[in-house]
């Protein structure tokens, strides 16, 4: 009897692990725009970061550093890697305590963000606790291009093993963008997004058929296909061409409407094609027209308006953020951003991320330039180095709303709007649009002034960016407080 009970418990635990489905903490969405698919001619990455429970987002600028010989980078689970002799400068969007929520943009224009994509792999080969949280930080510190970031990620995965179920990383630079999909253990695959196409990622793998003879567009671990054959997940004589998503995904996750619905509406809106929910969606696709920021804002803010998946019925039944089928813009959204990787400008001004804290349907996207050297104090908790040291050591006191973090102002806007969405959202949308126009005009003037002095007076140019960021935040908080009646 005891053995039977033990077997049943083990079976149920394994089933639970293998049948992971998105909850309100697995709802990230990413849009990748190839440089020839954008109206501006440069790569654009748009991302909604969703995580459940109490959260807060901090913004840091990490300086480049030289390191002593023999310096070690310790991983959370026990492994350790030799630190590089020199590490890059990077912007860091941090969510304290989270393993897989942070995003990075470094001095070479390499951007890293990610989406949880649960796999069918329960075991996987892990060495010394494996690698997870540290992966994207190492890429930010060391990579000089997107491809170099992909190759470095692959080397680290094959050395240590990935210690989470599965994930798709977006690794992009000023020239190209890649999806890097990893499975628990030491197996991974990467595919380059064609320059003239757009890709959308929910929380399942979207890489499908691969051509490992085409090393320009595909990279993978050596045993990717053979391992799947050994596990009985893939039989070429029966299954036909190898399909990574079909073979390695958690089946239940792959069939979840939380993923299918977001994939459907995202691809439909950006392609202009009348896809159905039951269609086989493409890895990448040509857009309806060349993509601008104004095309991306409404997709990131989509609540299934005008479709059968909108339980709020155009807000008549309340906020749309708790639809049964999770939206692209959902209750769990903690951050939304659009990164413009502009290669024809000095990177300090060419690297521009438009950031909406908490929820992008109601909070305007503030431009943050890579050249900022002094982040507004209320957007940070400590120095970058101290924040990294304390990332997993923060206590719940950071979630007290009486602290000085302006994060809570953005949270208040989202909560206040939700309480009477049908009446408050139109007013808030007008405020958001006015702020967006104000930001755009101010950014245009900053860039014009910056370009005229950055070579002759670099310190003054940097100070212009710092002052710009402070002015943007001050204006935002002022308008938010008016809306809240403060």
Image (cartoon, grey):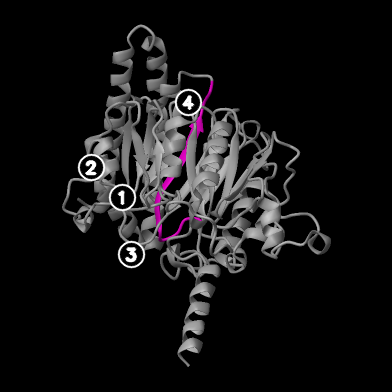
Crowding near the residue tagged with mark 4, few <14, some 14–19, many ≥20 C-alpha atoms within 10 Å: many
- Disc 1 designates what residue? 96
Residue carrying label 4 = 108
Q: From the viewer's side, name the closer residue of 180 and 293.
A: 180
User: In this picture, is 71 found above or below 229?
Assistant: above
Residue 58 relative to residue 169: left or right? left
Q: Residue furthest top?
A: 456
Residue at the image point whose x is 25% and y is 46% from the top:
390
Label 2 neighbour load within 10 Å: few <14, some 14-19, many 20+: some
Residue 93 visible in the snapshot: yes
Work out whether mark 2 precedes mark 4 in sequence or the reverse, and give the earlier one.
Answer: 4
Q: Is residue 328 above or below residue 40?
A: below
Q: CA distance from mark 2 to mark 3?
A: 30 Å
User: Which disc is residue 419 wearing?
Assistant: 3
Bin the neighbour count of mark 3 within 10 Å (Cα to Cα): few under 14, some 14-19, many 20 and up. Answer: few
Q: On residue 381, which mark appears?
A: 2
Spatial distance from mark 2 to mark 4, Cα to Cα? Answer: 26 Å
Q: Nearer the viewer, residue 466 or 303?
A: 466
């Amino acid at each position: 009897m005891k053995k039977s009970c033990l077997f049943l418990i083990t079976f149920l635990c394994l089933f639970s692990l293998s049948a992971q489905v998105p909850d309100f903490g697995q709802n990230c969405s990413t849009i990748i725009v190839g440089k020839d698919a954008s109206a501006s001619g440069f790569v654009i990455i748009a991302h909604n970061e969703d995580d459940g429970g109490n959260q807060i987002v901090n913004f840091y600028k990490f300086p480049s550093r030289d390191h002593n010989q023999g310096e070690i980078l310790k991983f959370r689970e026990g492994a350790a890697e030799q630190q590089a002799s020199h590490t890059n400068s990077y912007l860091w969007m941090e969510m304290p305590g989270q393993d897989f929520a942070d995003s990075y943009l470094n001095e070479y224009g390499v951007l890293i963000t990610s989406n949880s994509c649960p796999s069918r792999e329960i075991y996987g080969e892990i060495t010394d606790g494996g690698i997870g949280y540290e992966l994207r930080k190492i890429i930010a510190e060391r990579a000089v291009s997107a491809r170099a970031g992909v190759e470095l990620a692959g080397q680290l995965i094959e050395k240590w093993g990935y210690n989470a179920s599965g994930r798709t990383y977006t690794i992009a630079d000023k020239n190209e963008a890649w999806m890097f999909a990893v499975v628990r253990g030491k197996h991974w695959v990467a595919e380059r997004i064609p320059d003239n196409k757009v890709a959308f990622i929910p929380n399942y793998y979207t890489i499908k058929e691969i051509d490992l003879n085409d090393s320009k567009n595909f990279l993978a671990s050596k045993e990717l296909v053979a391992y799947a054959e050994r596990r009985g997940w893939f039989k070429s004589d029966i299954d036909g061409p190898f399909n990574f998503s079909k073979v390695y995904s958690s089946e239940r996750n792959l069939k979840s409407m939380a993923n299918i619905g977001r994939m459907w509406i995202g691809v439909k809106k950006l392609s202009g094609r009348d896809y159905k929910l039951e269609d086989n969606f493409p890895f990448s696709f040509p857009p309806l027209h060349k993509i601008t920021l104004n095309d991306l804002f409404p997709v990131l803010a989509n609540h299934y308006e005008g479709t059968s998946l909108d339980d709020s019925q155009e807000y008549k039944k309340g906020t749309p953020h708790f639809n049964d089928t999770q939206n692209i813009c959902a209750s769990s959204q903690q951050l939304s951003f659009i990164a413009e990787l502009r290669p024809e400008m000095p990177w300090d001004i060419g690297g521009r991320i438009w950031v909406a804290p908490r929820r992008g349907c109601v909070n305007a996207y503030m431009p943050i330039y890579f050249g900022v050297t002094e982040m507004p104090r209320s957007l940070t908790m400590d120095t970058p180095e101290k924040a990294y040291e304390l990332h997993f050591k923060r206590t719940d006191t950071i979630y007290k709303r009486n602290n000085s973090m302006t994060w809570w102002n953005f949270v208040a806007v989202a909560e206040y709007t939700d309480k009477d969405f049908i009446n408050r959202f139109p007013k808030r949308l007008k405020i958001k649009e006015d702020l967006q126009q104000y930001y755009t005009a101010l950014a245009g003037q900053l860039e014009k002034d910056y370009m005229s002095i950055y070579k002759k007076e670099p310190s003054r140019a940097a100070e212009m960016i710092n002052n710009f960021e402070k002015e943007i935040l001050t204006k935002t908080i002022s308008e938010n407080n008016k809306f809240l009646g403060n």
